[in-house]
Image (tube, grey):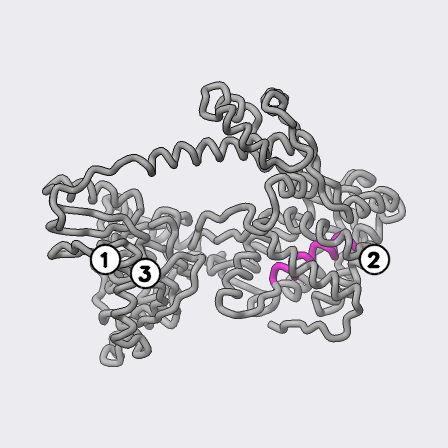
């Protein structure tokens, strides 16, 4: 993949390129199913106030970022939000907010008003042509993106190894759907675009008369309208930046979307020019919150103050002291809710047993290369980058390693044969009954015994003093610095999931970042016998603790 430089661009074009890169970071990342994780939807607006974000997203996305007024009314009525909370929120409110508590309560009684987004070029073209261009653009970009972002499900990837813009240009220059829908010469228009995405973006903005003043707002709007693909691209950018790499995929998507607008402008521009000029002018002005948006933001502030007050009361409550200064046993479990039953059962055996909850990877941010695998898997929360590395492929197990690799290749070839377009139906007809035993085992939760593999070993760079320092840091993070029990346990857990694309959401909050794998346990120390599709083969991913 070629990374473009900034040589040869004019000053205005450099401004547009800089804004495209800035806006790509205003989009919140979306993690794929194999490493799903909850992300703050306002991650790209952390430097702005709630009222500013409310005005921005209302203008470019028609979104309401606060709760419905009925939600605030109910909390005011039952006393969870007090007049003191409302007064405190009003004291810190920006200009334009309701002046009194009574006015704020009156605003909460009003009907909800949903903001209306500014129309894009595609919406303007839809109005004059009757063709659903916004929907068609989203569908055609989605048809390409589904293949481009494929993580191994597809049997063929015709554009593998190419950048996003180059891949789309090949796809769209052969796609006749837009022309069938009425956009004449679209394939030729795409084929005639420059091969460099930044050049194509600059020229498309010139055609639309889009200058830097309006570009940031409009670029943001276009990325929000891509059906979630921009969020997935942002996640690729996030990962690249954690690894110290450049990744133009999000700005490539923006270029693709602007080229669509330029093609529509070439056909409908004379009929939508006046409205587009007014919309451009609006995008060039800072977004301003309406009175209703401002009141809702103040009500949200009051609700959060009420929640903080309740939490402070809980934290300030006295905690009963333990009967013994030194526990008989300490066990640190993953904070996954499914560990709670084990913690409570263990505590019930003896009052001297103390359990703790901690992030399941126990602060050991490392990447592991499994037995018979060339893939280094980051076994830690997806928002972090690994600092250590380990491997389960020992030189003494070379023959077993090679045998496992051959077995994995055979399993993959057999799987592709079962899924191929020609052989899949005949395969089911001929061999379906043979799988009865496997179906019964799966239904009963019987897990076949995994092949033993060499124990994991940290790299030689992880010296003994560093290991001691790491262990000390982990214990401090868990507040285990004194009154140690005679026995201290760090307890991990495992799972077995078959044929569930949402598997990572079922395991420890999706803590692991394992491409094309079934995620499960949280703590790398219990993964000695971990088998997976990218290790020694097989579709299951299971652990022995």
Left or right side of 195 for 246: left
Q: Is residue 448 visible?
A: no
Picture quarter with the C terminus? bottom left
Q: How many marks?
A: 3
Label 3 or label 2, whichever comes before in sequence order: 2
Label 1 or label 2, whichever comes before in sequence order: 2
Cα–Cα span, label 3 and label 2: 53 Å
Circle nearer the viewer, 1 or 2: 1
Residue 514 has which mark? Answer: none
Q: Which residue is mark 2?
A: 207
Q: Secondary structure at mark 2?
A: helix
Q: Are marks 1 and 2 in contact (CB under 8 Å)?
A: no
Task: Give the residue drawn at x 75%, y 59%.
Answer: 187
Q: Position of residue 454 (x, y in %)?
A: 23, 71
Q: Which residue is mark 3?
A: 538
Residue 481 has which mark? Answer: 1
Q: Residues within 10 Å of mark 3 (few under 14, many from 20)?
A: some
**Residues in magenta, as a range:** 249-262
Q: Residues within 10 Å of mark 2 (few under 14, many from 20)?
A: some
Circle nearer the viewer, 3 or 2: 2
Compared with 321, 449 (above or below) is below
Left or right side of 155 for 132: right
Closest to the observer: 518 or 302?
Answer: 302
Closest to the observer: 355 or 483?
Answer: 483
Magenta stretch prevailing secondary structure = helix
Q: Residues within 10 Å of mark 1 (few under 14, many from 20)?
A: few
Closest to the observer: 161 or 403?
Answer: 161
């Amino acid at each position: 993949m070629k990374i473009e430089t900034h040589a040869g661009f004019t000053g205005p074009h450099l401004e547009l390129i800089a804004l495209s890169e800035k806006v790509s970071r205003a989009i919140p990342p979306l993690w794929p199913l194999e490493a799903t994780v909850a992300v703050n939807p306002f991650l790209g607006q952390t430097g702005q106030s709630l009222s500013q974000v409310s005005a921005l997203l209302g203008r470019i996305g028609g979104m309401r970022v606060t709760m419905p007024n009925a939600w605030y009314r109910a909390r005011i009525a039952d006393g969870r939000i007090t007049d003191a909370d409302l007064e405190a929120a009003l004291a810190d409110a920006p200009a334009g907010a309701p002046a009194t508590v009574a006015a704020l309560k009156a605003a909460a009684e009003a009907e909800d008003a949903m903001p209306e987004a500014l129309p894009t070029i595609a919406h303007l073209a839809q109005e004059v042509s009757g063709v659903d261009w916004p929907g068609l653009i989203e569908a055609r970009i989605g048809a390409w993106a589904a293949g481009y972002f494929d993580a191994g499900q597809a049997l063929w990837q015709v554009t593998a190894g190419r950048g996003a813009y180059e891949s789309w240009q090949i796809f769209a220059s052969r796609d006749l759907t837009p022309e069938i829908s009425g956009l004449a010469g679209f394939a030729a228009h795409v084929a005639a675009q420059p091969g460099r995405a930044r050049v194509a973006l600059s020229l498309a903005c010139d055609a639309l008369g889009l200058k830097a003043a309006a570009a940031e707002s409009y670029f943001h709007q276009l990325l929000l309208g891509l059906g979630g693909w921009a969020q997935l691209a942002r996640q690729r950018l996030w990962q690249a930046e954690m690894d110290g790499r450049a990744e133009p995929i999000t700005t490539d998507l923006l270029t693709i979307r602007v080229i669509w607008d330029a093609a529509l402008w070439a056909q409908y521009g004379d009929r939508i020019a006046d409205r587009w000029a007014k919309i451009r002018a609006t995008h060039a002005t800072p977004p301003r919150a309406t009175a209703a948006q401002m009141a809702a933001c103040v009500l949200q502030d009051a609700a959060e103050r009420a929640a903080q007050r309740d939490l402070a009361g809980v934290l300030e409550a006295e905690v009963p002291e333990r009967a013994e200064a030194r526990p008989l046993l300490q066990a640190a479990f993953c904070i996954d809710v499914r560990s709670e039953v084990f913690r409570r059962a263990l505590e019930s055996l003896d009052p001297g047993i103390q359990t703790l909850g901690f992030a399941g990877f126990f602060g050991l941010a490392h990447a592991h290369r499994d037995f018979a695998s060339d893939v280094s898997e980051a076994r830690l929360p997806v928002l972090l980058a690994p600092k250590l590395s380990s491997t389960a492929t020992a030189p003494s197990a070379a023959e077993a390693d090679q045998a496992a690799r051959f077995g994995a290749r055979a399993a993959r070839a057999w799987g592709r044969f079962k899924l191929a377009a020609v052989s899949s139906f005949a395969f089911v007809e001929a061999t379906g009954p043979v799988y009865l035993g496997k179906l019964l085992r799966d239904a009963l939760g019987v897990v076949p015994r995994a092949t033993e593999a060499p124990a994991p070993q940290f790299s030689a760079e992880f010296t003994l003093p560093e290991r001691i320092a790491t262990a000390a840091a982990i214990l401090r993070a868990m507040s285990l610095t004194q009154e140690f029990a005679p026995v201290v346990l760090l307890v991990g857990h495992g799972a077995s999931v078959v044929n569930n694309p949402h598997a990572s959401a079922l395991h420890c909050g999706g803590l692991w970042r394992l491409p094309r794998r079934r995620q499960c346990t949280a703590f790398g120390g219990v993964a000695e016998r971990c088998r997976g599709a990218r290790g020694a083969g097989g579709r299951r991913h299971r652990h022995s603790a």
